[in-house]
């Protein structure tokens, strides 16, 4: 046992004191030199401090590579102190990646593709194209491209996206080579013109101005180029064979990295008669259990877990059991922990909630027509079925609605999506019997499905922040040009894509839908200094959406002119002269352009039935280092947990402002931390900054919904709209979702809430109660920024 | 409530007995703890250990040794805490509000035991390896030493049926502080650091997910225990004298040493980013925090060397494709309305 003597100096004898002096050994010296060089243009970075931390953590057999790895982690750990450390960490990682790739033979772009082809990863067409234009393409690679990454983005690219050698598991491409490979996978024609096109797409990606969605990044140019993000399947028919064949379809789609949206509204509810055996059905829950297991079993190409969302119409008699599927208590046999759940809600239900009347629940076998109807026809059929006494049972609409709200609060799941709003403005529902039966995994895709057509969508997102110029203006022309390139290449995916099931291939060639979205709206607001809930922010946001829609539709006309309209064009509302905005009462910003577009559509038709959808962009926004899609920031300081570990992010806009105000110091950082990433508790921070830097938890959710409603006319599909409530109550939630429905949103996504209690600070250095003078001097020399005793 | 006869009847929290009255409530804070704890309910089935099995195959020899020892410690750690809770804490903390919380804590400890049991069954498919892990309290010296530290502080109060004397109550306080500050607050925090070290390298996410939730629970257990200590000190100020402070400090030093010899066993020559020296600094820093919470002078003045532990208290934003979000509440109140503010 240790004695209890005086706790002050001297320090106890250290067990591995050997590493404390960087000058004493060669790897340590080399490290310090590297760090100093790499941070020459980063004035806030202290290379000595990073080196010291790395040396402290090293193992007995540490070589230079281990030290650099530790230095990278040490730098990453300091990002919360100054965002410039992110650049240093990213540079160290880029260096490591380049060495790793070169070790596998990827010394230039053409070599990287050749290695990939040799190892059976890269497809023949792409390999041949690259070989034929090797020198030109090598010259396209931007040698400074990697320096645009923040650490978190580069880390994500490295651990998730770069192709790896099948045996050694080392990467065989650098981040820039990866982006050019993705672009080359979308090449058509094989000639010099296509090299120029590919170079243009690569340029957008390398500058992080536009990124295709993850499946395209994963698979473009490979032997199985499955590049679509989303698949929407109609409900299985109310029979065993159909139910089981859906499992197989879903497994195939999931294997190739697609997210699944699936309706289950046609399958009979519990207690219904099974004629073949004269028994009674157990309803949908046991079948969803099997789906749950199947989804967990098939992970997406071994890279991320399979994921599916099941949609159920609100009149289905199993709705209450459906609501319990994600509960973490109760009978495990009736739980599905891997499935996401969404409600496909007819307006009639919301009206009855509003009027506080009864709601009837049916088994689909008794009312098979309801699934394919929407709007007035649905309302009439529903009332008729009630009058015919077909209901299994009747409950107060508000009781069910309250139950839905509770599930949202408890699990974040049970997303509210609106069947009638989704169908009413849909371009594909011009003909009777064409129905959107569900949205997708992330509630931004709305496309018709039936038993023989699985809807498919491939996505990409424009990084909006990149279009704010130095004068606080949006560069509209450059945005147009980016959208043109993006749509052209999204359209190409349809032809090059590998379709895991025939149902998916059929649908995609008929409708050719794509989903161009956006990310970094919050970055735009920060750059323009607009509060998220201000009228100006709403105006800018709406204007951006309008402009993107205009440019996307113009491009689709252009493509139709060159390559032909999509097969089912005659069946669309557009062919009847009705554009998406006609369903909304809006005053457009650029009326002449709309008129010109209308005339052009009438003449040439469209190459794509649908063009726009705002996806969550979780991963690609982190690659680009911007805020997700249209979302407000969740915190000024937060930790991201991903498959590749944990990373800290701090709002760089806030840090820049705090530095200007002379407030960026240890006290402020502690206040940010103690405030859970809120800027509201920062002492001396002027009110205008506090308002600008409010988080999603501090903003009125009404504003998020209003912004979403204002952009709705300019999204022919939908948007992944998360809503945030720190401490949800049934009253608040029911008001909020009723409002979302009233203003005409087609879909909403997760309800985000916060943990009830916080984890204790794991290891904050205890407030020093006795600080001797010697202590204070020592630590201020070694550690001028972080020592609390010195502040 | 009036001050007249309540002062006459007023009892202290460590007075022997089994108080039943919840109204008027004397310790509403403990009742709030109980209610908050319920909101953090989680079940073992929610933790997906699937990817861990693949990770285990990738580990180096040193890492495998580390995780083997760690799992062996987990196998019995929470059971020891449960036993002490039932045998000592529940018996002597004479407040029905606090006993509600302790009942809840007991459930949480059971979930933790179940989690680590499931973990062990998953990590160690061979029945003999499993049996050996549960035998670690006896057979692995570095774990035995920690267990004996715990048992010593359990034995010290086991024979006391009622806390009649001041010395009885001091011995009880030491037991309470030992379990909060040294066992849950230091041994477990040491174990968490290894887990998060693995995670910081992209390994063993299932273990890390479960540990997140265990961590959240343990944070509350510790907070509760310290508030009981605060209450006792407020009610009986002379109990926690200088002498007791010294005994607490010595106990923490002993705990740091016990955990450090465990660290020597786990780390061996050291792994990248994890070695005995860093662990020492970390443990000293944690121990200082416990002392500071108890209003005692800090002993070491060490800084936390583990950046990945700093991250532990920052808000999570999990990408749902990757892992289940662990932040949802359980109890939701209210009824349907259309004009609430949102």
Image (cartoon, grey):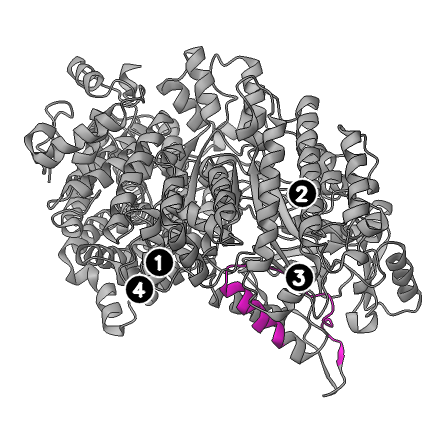
Let me know if marks 4 and 2 both belong to one chain: no
**Around disc 3, counting alpha carbons within 10 Å, would you say few (fewer than 14), some (14 to 19), or many (20 or more)?**
some
Range covered by the magenta-colored residues? A244-273
Q: In the image, is A371 to the left or to the right of B167?
A: right
Question: How far separated are the C-alphas under marks 3 and 1?
Answer: 30 Å
* Picture coordinates of residue B64, whole percent (x, y): 22, 58
Q: Going by the picture, which residue comes out furthest to the bottom? A: A277
- Compared with residue A177, is residue B43 higher up or lower down, i.e. above or below? below
**Around disc 4, counting alpha carbons within 10 Å, would you say few (fewer than 14), some (14 to 19), or many (20 or more)?**
some
Q: Which mark is residue A728?
A: none
Circle 4: element type:
helix
Q: Mark 2 highlights which residue?
A: A555
Question: How far separated are the C-alphas under marks 4 and 2?
Answer: 55 Å
The chain letter under disc 4 is: B
Q: Mark 1 highlights which residue?
A: A116
* Picture coordinates of residue B9, whole percent (x, y): 49, 33
Residue B53 position by quadrant: bottom left
Q: Mark 4 highlights which residue?
A: B123
Q: Which mark is residue A509?
A: 3
The chain letter under disc 3 is: A
Let me know if marks 3 and 1 both belong to one chain: yes
């Amino acid at each position: 046992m240790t004695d209890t003597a005086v706790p002050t100096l001297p320090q106890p004898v250290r067990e591995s004191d050997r590493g404390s002096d960087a000058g004493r050994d060669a790897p340590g010296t080399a490290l310090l030199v590297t760090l100093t060089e790499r941070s020459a243009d980063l004035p806030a970075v202290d290379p000595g401090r990073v080196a010291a931390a790395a040396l402290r953590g090293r193992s007995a057999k540490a070589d230079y590579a281990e030290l650099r790895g530790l230095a990278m982690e040490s730098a990453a750990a300091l990002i919360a102190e100054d965002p410039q450390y992110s650049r240093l960490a990213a540079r160290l990682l880029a260096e490591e990646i380049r060495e790793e790739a070169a070790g596998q033979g990827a010394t230039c772009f053409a070599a990287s593709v050749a290695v990939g082809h040799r190892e059976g990863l890269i497809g023949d067409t792409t390999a041949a194209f690259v070989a034929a234009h090797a020198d030109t393409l090598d010259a396209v690679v931007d040698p400074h491209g990697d320096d645009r990454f923040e650490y978190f983005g580069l880390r994500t690219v490295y651990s998730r996206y770069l192709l790896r050698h099948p045996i050694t598991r080392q990467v065989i491409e650098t981040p820039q080579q990866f982006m050019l490979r993705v672009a080359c996978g979308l090449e058509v024609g094989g000639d010099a013109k296509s090299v120029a096109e590919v170079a243009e797409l690569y340029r957008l990606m390398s500058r992080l101005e536009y990124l295709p969605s993850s499946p395209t990044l994963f698979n473009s140019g490979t032997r199985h180029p499955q590049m679509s993000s989303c698949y929407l399947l109609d409900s299985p028919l109310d029979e065993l064979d159909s139910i089981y064949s859906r499992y197989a379809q879903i497994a195939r789609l999931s294997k190739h990295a697609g997210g699944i949206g699936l309706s289950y509204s046609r399958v009979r509810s519990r207690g219904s008669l099974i004629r073949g055996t004269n028994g009674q059905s157990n309803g949908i829950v046991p079948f969803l259990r099997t789906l749950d297991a199947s989804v967990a079993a098939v992970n997406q190409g071994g890279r991320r877990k399979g994921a599916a969302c099941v949609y159920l119409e609100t009149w289905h008699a199993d709705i209450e059991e459906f609501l319990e599927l994600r509960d973490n208590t109760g009978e495990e046999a009736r739980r599905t922990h891997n499935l996401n759940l969404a409600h496909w809600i007819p307006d009639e239900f919301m009206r009855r909630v509003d009027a506080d009347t009864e709601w009837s629940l049916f088994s689909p076998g008794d009312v098979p027509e309801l699934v394919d109807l929407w709007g007035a026809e649905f309302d009439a059929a529903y009332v008729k079925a009630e009058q015919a006494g077909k209901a299994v049972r009747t409950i107060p609409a508000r009781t069910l609605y309250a139950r839905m709200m509770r599930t949202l609060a408890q699990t974040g799941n049970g997303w509210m999506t609106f069947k009638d709003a989704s169908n009413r403005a849909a371009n594909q529902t011009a003909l009777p019997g064409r129905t959107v039966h569900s949205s997708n995994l992330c509630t931004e895709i709305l496309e018709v499905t039936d038993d023989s057509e699985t809807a498919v969508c491939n996505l990409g997102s424009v990084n909006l922040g990149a279009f704010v110029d130095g004068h606080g203006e949006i560069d509209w022309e450059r945005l147009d040009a980016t959208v043109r390139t993006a749509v052209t290449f999204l359209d190409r995916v349809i032809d090059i894509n590998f379709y895991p099931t025939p149902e998916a291939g059929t649908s995609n060639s008929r409708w050719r839908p794509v989903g161009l979205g956006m990310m970094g709206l919050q970055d735009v607001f920060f750059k323009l200094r607009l509060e998220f809930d201000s009228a100006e922010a709403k105006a800018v946001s709406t204007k951006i959406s309008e402009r993107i829609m205009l440019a996307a539709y113009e491009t689709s006309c252009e493509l139709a002119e060159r390559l032909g309209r999509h097969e089912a064009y005659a069946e669309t509302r557009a062919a009847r002269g009705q554009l998406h905005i006609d369903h909304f009462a809006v005053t457009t910003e650029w009326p002449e352009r709309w008129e010109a577009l209308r005339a052009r559509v009438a003449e040439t038709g469209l190459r794509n039935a649908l063009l726009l959808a705002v996806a969550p962009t979780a991963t690609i926004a982190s690659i680009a280092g911007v805020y997700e899609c249209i979302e407000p920031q969740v915190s000024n300081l937060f930790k991201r947990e991903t498959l590749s570990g944990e990373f800290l992010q701090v709002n760089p806009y806030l840090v820049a402002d705090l530095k200007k105000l002379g407030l960026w110091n240890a006290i402020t950082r502690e206040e940010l931390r103690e405030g859970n990433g809120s800027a509201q508790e920062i002492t001396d921070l002027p009110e205008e900054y506090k308002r600008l830097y409010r988080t999603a938890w501090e903003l009125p959710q009404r504003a998020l919904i209003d912004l979403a409603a204002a952009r709705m006319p300019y999204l022919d599909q939908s948007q992944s709209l998360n809503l945030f409530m720190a401490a949800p109550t049934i009253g608040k939630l029911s008001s909020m979702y009723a409002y979302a429905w009233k203003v005409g949103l087609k879909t909403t996504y997760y309800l985000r809430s916060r943990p009830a209690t916080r984890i204790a600070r794991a290891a904050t250095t205890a407030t020093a109660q006795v600080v001797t003078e010697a202590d204070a001097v020592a630590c201020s020399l070694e550690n001028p920024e972080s020592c609390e005793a010195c502040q | 409530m009036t001050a007249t006869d309540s002062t006459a009847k007023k009892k202290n929290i460590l007075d022997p007995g089994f108080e039943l009255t919840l109204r008027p409530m004397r310790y509403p804070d403990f009742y709030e703890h109980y209610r908050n704890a319920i909101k953090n309910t989680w079940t073992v089935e929610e933790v997906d250990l699937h990817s861990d099995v693949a990770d285990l195959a990738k580990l180096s020899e040193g890492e495998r040794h580390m995780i083997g020892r760690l799992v062996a410690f987990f196998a019995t750690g929470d059971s020891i805490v449960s036993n002490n809770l039932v045998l000592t804490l529940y018996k002597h903390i004479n407040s029905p509000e606090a006993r509600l919380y302790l009942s809840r804590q007991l459930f949480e400890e059971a979930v933790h035991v179940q989690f680590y049991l499931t973990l062990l069954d998953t990590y160690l498919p061979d029945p003999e390896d499993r049996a050996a892990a549960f035998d670690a309290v006896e057979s692995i010296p570095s774990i035995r030493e920690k267990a004996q530290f715990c048992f010593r502080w359990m034995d010290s109060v086991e024979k006391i049926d009622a806390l009649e004397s001041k010395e009885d109550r001091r011995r009880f306080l030491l037991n309470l502080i030992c379990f909060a500050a040294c066992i849950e607050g230091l041994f477990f925090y040491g174990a968490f650091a290894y887990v998060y070290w693995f995670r910081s390298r992209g390994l063993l996410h299932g273990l890390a997910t479960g540990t997140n939730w265990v961590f959240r629970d343990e944070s509350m257990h510790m907070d509760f225990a310290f508030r009981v200590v605060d209450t006792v000190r407020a009610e009986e100020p002379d109990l926690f004298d200088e002498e007791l402070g010294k005994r607490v400090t010595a106990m923490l030093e002993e705990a740091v040493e016990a955990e450090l010899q465990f660290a020597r066993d786990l780390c061996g020559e050291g792994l990248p980013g994890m070695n005995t020296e860093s662990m020492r600094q970390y443990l000293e820093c944690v121990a200082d925090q416990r002392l500071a919470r108890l209003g005692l002078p800090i002993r070491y003045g060490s800084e936390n060397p583990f950046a990945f532990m700093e991250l532990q208290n920052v808000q999570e934003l999990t990408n749902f494709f990757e892992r289940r979000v662990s932040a949802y509440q359980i109890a939701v109140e209210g009824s349907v309305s259309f004009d609430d503010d949102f």
